Amino acid sequence: MAIYKNLSFEILLQMPDILTPAVLIFALTYIGVAIGEVPGLAIDRTGIALLGGVAMIAFGVLDTDHAVAAVDFPTILLLFGLMVLSSQFRLAGFYTHVAMALTRAMDRPRRFLWQLMLASGALSAILANDIVCLAFTPVLAWSLARRRLNPIPFLLGLALASNIGSAATIIGNPQNMLIGQVGRLSFTHFFLWCAIPSAISLAAAYGIVIALYRNQWGAAAAQETPHGEWPEYSPTQARKGGIVAALLVAAFFTDIPRELSALVAAGVLLCSRKLATRSLMGLVDWHLIALFIGLFVVVRGFEDSGLPAWIVETTRQRGVHLEDPYVLTAVAAVLSNIVSNVPAVMVLIKFLPADSPEPWYVLALASTFAGNLITIGSIANLIVIEQAKQAGIRISFAEHARAGIPATVASFAILCVWIALAG
């Protein structure tokens, strides 16, 4: 007992000052990101992250040179290139065309749900899951209303599948891109490790939605929603995007830097006779890019305070190691649902070993699967809910949790089994 007390006292003596500007700015920034707003101000998570980065410079935690050096530009460039590719598909009407094609199976709801979840999961593994949800939701809402089907299970299936499917590849979502770039992970090995638990989790999520809504496929009082303004389908532009996407994915399996491949792909797409540069660039999610930049600076300032290293060392002395895949899974699940998965990953990657890829794979799967737990866990969830609301369909927090919680629990159980088998 005396030894334990001495150890605790010694640890406290070694603790860095937590009242430094770096720690306070980090804490306030992450609290703001978790809440999503500042009362009395019209500011969102991106603005809060940028203010945090500005504060790190203004209070002398980092000078401008170190702030710029904190930004992982290969990740930013990869994100930008893939956003331009997604813009090409959106302007070509590809997403709407696929969604409308899927609606032909609506006379068999279970089969339609499976095709919808499979298609959205597969597209999210290659393109942005947020964009898939943004493009699919209005088409689904309109089509389901016309066929007098209950839209809830299908829209929930779309959100669940998009999140799960995006976990399978390095380019499936922003946090995976960050993990892949910072961890210098192989695209091939990442896919081989993450695709199987993602596929099994997708099947489990389908089974859960089927079980929850097995006798609720019809809408009690369906109201036809207005037809949205959807891009007209252009086979030529969709084919151009498909060819570029195929070549880009092929390049990811080589030793060519991913950010270089993505930039070249974006450059090819910008050379267009039909789609204006302003249109393609206008669909790039500049807010997400700005969020990344702000968080890079905030996390670097916090890292330089010495507190993160002290926390990791202290927990390691108590027998808690982030290198343990089960511990990492639990921490990622909790943190991702407090501050969202991108900010959570920003912090956790600082403590992962550089010589072992498995913890990086675990973090990618855990942080992405965690997005299905509650509505605020993933931007894709919020997109589906907000787009559905505009179509007169209300998906409550409880309704989402009814499917999201068991789907997340099943995904984490599958991940834990996969970790055991892989080990």
Image: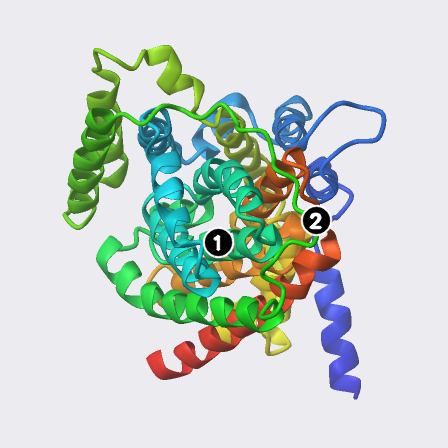
Judged left or right of residue 354, residue 207 is right
Mark sitting on residue 286: none
Q: Position of residue 90 (x, y in %)?
A: 37, 29
Q: Position of residue 131 (x, y in %)?
A: 45, 37
Q: Residues within 10 Å of mark 2 (few under 14, many from 20)?
A: few
Q: Secondary structure at mark 2?
A: loop
Q: How is the image coloured?
A: rainbow
The quadrant of the rendering that contains the N terminus is bottom right
Query: Residue 405 lies in what quarter of the image?
Result: bottom right
Residue type (three-letter) at the residue carrying disc 1: Asn
- Which sits in the foreground, 198 or 52? 198
Q: Secondary structure at mark 1?
A: helix
Q: Is any atom of residue 247 visible in this view?
A: yes
Question: What residue is pinned by disc 2?
Answer: 221
Question: What residue is pinned by disc 1?
Answer: 163
- Which sits in the foreground, 69 or 334? 334
Label 1–label 2 contact, CB within 8 A? no
Q: CA distance from mark 1 to mark 2?
A: 30 Å
Q: Position of residue 350 (x, y in %)?
A: 49, 52
- Which sits in the foreground, 390 or 12? 390
Q: Is any atom of residue 182 visible in this view?
A: no
Q: Residues within 10 Å of mark 1 (few under 14, many from 20)?
A: many
**Residue occupying the point 46% across, 59% down:** 113
Q: Which of the two discs, 1 and 2, labels the residue nearer the N terminus?
A: 1
